[in-house]
Amino acid sequence: MSNTMPDTTYDKPMPPLNRDSKPFWDSLKDHAMRLQRCADCGKVRHYPRPVCDSCYSMEVDWMRASGRGKIHSWTITHHAFHPGFLGNLPLALVTVDLDEGVRICAQIRDLAPDQLRVGMPVRVDYEDATADLTLPVFRPA
Amino acid sequence: MTSLMDKCAVTGIGETAYTKNSGKSVVALQMEASLKAIADAGLKPTDIDGVIPYGSLEVVAEEFITNLGLQDLRFSAVTPLGGASAVAAIQAAVSALVAGVANHVLIPIGRNGSSGERIGARAAAMPQFRTVGEYEMPSGNIAPPQLYAHMARRHMEMYGTTSRQLAEIAVTVRSNAILNDNAVMQKPMTIEDHQNSRMISDPLRLFDCCLESDGGAAVIISRAEQARDLAQRPIYIMGVAEGHPDSPSTITQRPDMTTLGTAKAAPRAFGMAGVSHKDIDVAEIYDCFTYIVMCQLEDLGFCKKGEGGDFVSNGRIALDGELPINTHGGLLSQSHIIGMNHVCELVKQLRGNAGKAQVANAEIGLVTGYGDMGDGAVAIMRN
Ligand SMILES: [Zn+2]
């Protein structure tokens, strides 16, 4: 039994959490994004998974991410592929090259679609969607 | 290593009517297409001893034992590559046939993609979409038109590709559909119609996106020495291969998001076939989106990376052009039968009975499949 009331008003897709990714989602809740790093060879990897594809180690640690990156690509979505996003159109989604060498896909704020450019510097921010879920967003750096 | 070149042939093809509302079950559509393919080959249902059903639909190989009275099904497999499954299944079938595991392999596909469950709902439930489901869907990056829009935008920014160039593909494929009595879309389309179609996920407009359809299609693959004694002229499989891109389950993390698994499959398929690009008389290119057609043409080697926009312009891909593509109308304008309609069309072209869209003297052709965010498969066939 949960101690808190479930949030029944949130109508967007929820991430199905798993053991490999829990530290990542927890770090977003803390507004301090962490990335999975191989504890043996130091290679940063995203999205979280159990094995390092460089040295096959299954030992991991979690590093604090700089939160800085550059726009790699984007799309502006005008159609609600999930009813939860009907009130959020158009939806500006960016793929961002993080300084750590991995990418993240998230919504971008404070930028008109016609200002988007490959290589534009951005920084991560956090939006609390529910008491248990925080999503990353990007803003111009 | 044993080459698979010319060891097997497509011996039968079958297609149902392609519609927006079949009024039939998915099993019934697949059985109807399968029975047509078996009859086309001049075989009896009980001659089928291998089945490769589509992995993500509700029909399993054992349905064919039950419905067709198969006495000794010796080989079954699935090729879970989304839209690349049909062509990847040809590779699996040829491998099993050459090894002597089976004699006549049936590859059926059939779906109610229009009247039944739509692709967005299906995709979210597929294990291949688990990663996107966890990390991207919560932010709103949910459906293929959005996932692929990031690829298309990157291509445009890197290479200057334009929406009007993508329109060339949509318009060409529509003009082919109009020649085909079994194509859903029959209304002519102009470049301006494409440019005026509503934006779905920029840069992809409505007319950059394929149809959702009901229907079934099936092929039979047999060893060459048996194919020669059957009812149809054998269409030999010269080369076939599948390829998976880097970071196959998320486009976001792919080092080069403008390159598909097709780029890995193509050199193997061409190498096995022993032909070059100028030998290809007709190409049926998996066209879930116009951008994916252009990207495959690059990854297949018909032009260099970044030159796809120019390649598809100036009539080169039209019926009377240098490389006619999607002569049946494709997924964009004929029907979305997960690319099995592309395989059937290539066989018709090489048999010389493709009707009003027949490419003159078509002797060697190519068919591709593409799916699951980047998997590619390529088959090269001859008559
Ligand atoms: Zn390592």
Image: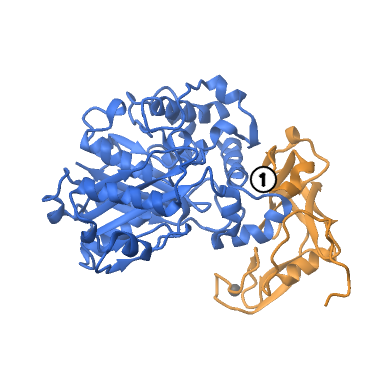
Looking at the image, in which quadrant does ligand 1 appear?
bottom right
Q: Which residue is mark 1?
A: A81
Give the vertical position of A52 relative to B130 (above or below): below
Of A112 and B235, the residue lying toward us: B235
Q: Is residue B91 visible?
A: yes
From the rendered image, report the letter of the chain displayed in blue.
Answer: B
- For the point 34% across and 48% down, the residue is B32
- For the point 67% across and 41% down, the residue is A75
The amino acid at mark 1 is Phe
Name the residue furthest right.
A4
Of B72 and B325, the residue lying toward us: B72
Give the vertical position of B195 relative to B53 (above or below): above
Of A3 and B237, the residue lying toward us: A3
From the rendered image, report the letter of the chain displayed in orange.
Answer: A
Would residue B353 be found to the left or right of residue B77 on screen? left
The C terminus of chain B, quarter of image: top left
Q: Position of residue B83 (x, y in %)?
A: 45, 50
Give the vertical position of A125 relative to B293 (above or below): below
| Neighbours of disc 1 within 10 Å: few (<14), some (14-19), many (20+) | many
Would residue B99 be found to the left or right of residue A87 on screen? left
* Quadrant assignment, res A35: bottom right
Q: Position of residue B129 (x, y in %)?
A: 58, 58
Indicate the colouring scheme: by chain
Name the residue furthest front.
B23
* Quadrant assignment, res B135: bottom right
Q: Circle 1 sits in a helix, a strand or a loop, which is it? A: loop
